[in-house]
């Protein structure tokens, strides 16, 4: 067994990326990293670890004939290896203009939507993408330069829902050596040399400087730092979520935080509790360090008022009270790009369009907390949930039966009743089951048919958390 294959096997097992015998869809762009990943996964297939069932390629139509050449290469590669090729084309530049977002973000959304469709076509359990240790180091530096905290510095996670990254312990140089040793051709993307793109500037200018002038092992060092940050962030986020159930409550359209209890928390937890509460009040809005600190000062010092993105915070007696306030909406009343991602149980899926992630896991009865779904936690009856689950943005005509209201309601009317600002409604994730029923309007309400009536039949625990940055 090639040394890289053994290392990837360790990564897959250590990070629980795919169970034995899992069916993998390989996302192949035609570049060196994804082509090497495909061949390495096929070596694992020969060892009996997994099955590669197809390759998926999305033509972004950004590079004209070169993009068409990448598509043709991937089709030929799949044929030579005896694999089905699932290929689609998307006008990413046009999507970016329509969504009023960057080409990078539009491409990310369209790729992931395509991967989910492709995985369904070939009945794949996991979608393998070719991010490497170098990508991890670049992402860490980009987020460090933007002022991210531990959650953001966690950078690229080994698994996000059904998407897995088996190459995170392998460098680009090692993959190139593998391709050369096996005489495997690949495509070069000239846009990777464009240093007007921040990631390319980090790749071609900052990392070489750090490698040459400070430490040759900078990529390995940054990759380890991201892993440490990820483990720390996950632990602290869980502690903050547990503390938040005691300190934070919603009354009508207000979120109230026990000021004395918050002031007594260690700062690492207090910041997370406040950020979570603020993001609950104004989903999809960026909440910076200064805004969080100003709300903490209301708890610790008292008095005054804080205006933050999409909300206002005030000290009211023993509580800090957060209230939503109107913001500006974009053309047509829409701000966020549409999104749709598959959610496995157990599993987690990130939605960069809404700056959040949702996880799902089977659990045991934990009491009434979260039953209404009006927080970052919802508990629903496992026996009523029909898989597969999808997390998506709202569609015209969406309706559901909110728990406890006794009747069916249009989602638009529900948002109006709950005073959800128009400029954030498109960013509220909906968890929808295999029959198209809304299980959870994340952060607001559970569908009545999914209420827990018999805990012995098991529950599904859904959690909403904010992302620390892109990727």
Image (tube, grey):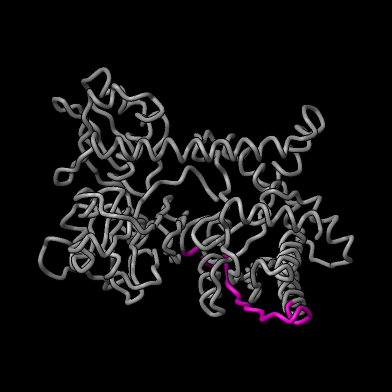
Residue range highlighted in magenta: 78-98
Residue drawn where x is 47% and y is 58% of the image? 100
Against 53, residue 6 (above or below) is: above
Q: How many marks?
A: 0
Q: Position of residue 67 (x, y in %)?
A: 71, 70
Q: Position of residue 94 (x, y in %)?
A: 54, 67
Q: Residue furthest left?
A: 406
Residue drawn where x is 74% and y is 55% of the image? 6
Residue 258 figure quarter: top left
Residue 102 figure quarter: bottom right
In reply to whether residue 82 is colored magenta, the answer given is yes
Q: Position of residue 326 (x, y in %)?
A: 25, 46
Q: Quadrant of the N terminus?
A: bottom right
Left or right: residue 430 versus residue 54 is left
Q: Position of residue 369 (x, y in %)?
A: 22, 48
In reply to whether residue 105 is colored magenta, the answer given is no
Against 62, residue 258 (above or below) is: above
Q: Residue furthest top?
A: 301
Left or right: residue 401 versus residue 188 is left
Against 404, residue 309 (above or below) is: above
Residue drawn where x is 29% and y is 60% of the image? 459
The residue lying toward the viewer, choosing from 457 and 373, is 457
Residue drawn where x is 30% and y is 45% of the image? 280
Residue 159 figure quarter: bottom right
């Amino acid at each position: 067994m090639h040394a890289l294959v053994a290392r990837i096997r360790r990564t897959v097992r250590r990070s629980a990326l795919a169970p034995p015998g899992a069916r993998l869809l390989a996302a192949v762009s035609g570049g060196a990293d994804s082509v090497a990943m495909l061949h390495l996964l096929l070596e694992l297939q020969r060892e009996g670890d997994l099955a590669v069932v197809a390759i998926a390629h999305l033509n972004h139509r950004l590079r004209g004939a070169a993009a068409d050449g990448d598509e043709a290469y991937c089709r030929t590669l799949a044929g030579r290896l005896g694999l089905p090729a699932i290929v689609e084309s998307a006008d990413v530049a046009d999507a970016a203009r329509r969504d009023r977002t960057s080409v990078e973000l539009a491409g990310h959304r369209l790729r992931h939507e395509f991967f989910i469709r492709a995985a369904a076509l070939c009945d794949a359990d996991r979608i393998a993408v070719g991010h490497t240790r170098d990508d991890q180091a670049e992402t860490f530096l980009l987020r460090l330069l933007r002022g991210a905290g531990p959650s953001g510095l966690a950078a690229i996670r080994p698994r996000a829902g059904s998407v897995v990254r088996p190459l995170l312990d392998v460098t680009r140089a090692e993959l190139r050596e593998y391709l050369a040793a096996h005489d495997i051709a690949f495509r070069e993307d000239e846009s990777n040399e464009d240093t007007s793109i921040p990631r390319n500037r980090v790749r071609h200018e900052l990392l070489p400087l750090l490698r040459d002038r400070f430490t040759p092992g900078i990529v390995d060092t940054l990759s380890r730092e991201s892993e440490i940050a990820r483990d720390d962030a996950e632990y602290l986020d869980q502690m903050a979520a547990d503390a938040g159930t005691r300190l934070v409550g919603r009354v009508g359209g207000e979120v109230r935080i026990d000021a004395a209890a918050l002031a007594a928390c260690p700062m690492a937890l207090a910041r997370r509790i406040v950020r979570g509460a603020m993001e609950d009040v104004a989903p999809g809005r960026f909440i910076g360090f200064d805004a969080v600190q100003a709300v903490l000062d209301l708890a610790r010092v008292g008095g005054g008022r804080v205006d933050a993105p999409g909300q206002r915070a005030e000290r009211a007696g023993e509580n800090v009270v957060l209230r939503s306030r109107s913001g500006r909406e974009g053309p047509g009343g829409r701000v966020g790009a549409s999104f749709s991602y598959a959610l496995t149980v157990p599993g987690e899926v990130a939605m960069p369009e809404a700056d959040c992630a949702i996880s799902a896991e089977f659990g045991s009865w934990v009491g009434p907390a979260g039953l209404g779904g009006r927080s970052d936690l919802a508990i629903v009856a496992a026996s009523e949930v029909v898989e597969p689950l999808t997390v998506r943005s709202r569609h015209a005509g969406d309706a559901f039966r909110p728990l406890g209201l006794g009747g069916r309601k249009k989602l638009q009317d529900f948002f109006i009743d709950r005073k959800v600002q128009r400029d954030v409604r498109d960013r509220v994730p909906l968890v929808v089951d295999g029959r198209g029923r809304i299980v959870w309007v994340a952060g607001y309400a559970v569908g009545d048919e999914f209420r827990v009536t018999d805990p012995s039949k098991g529950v599904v625990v859904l959690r909403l958390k904010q992302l620390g940055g892109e990727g």
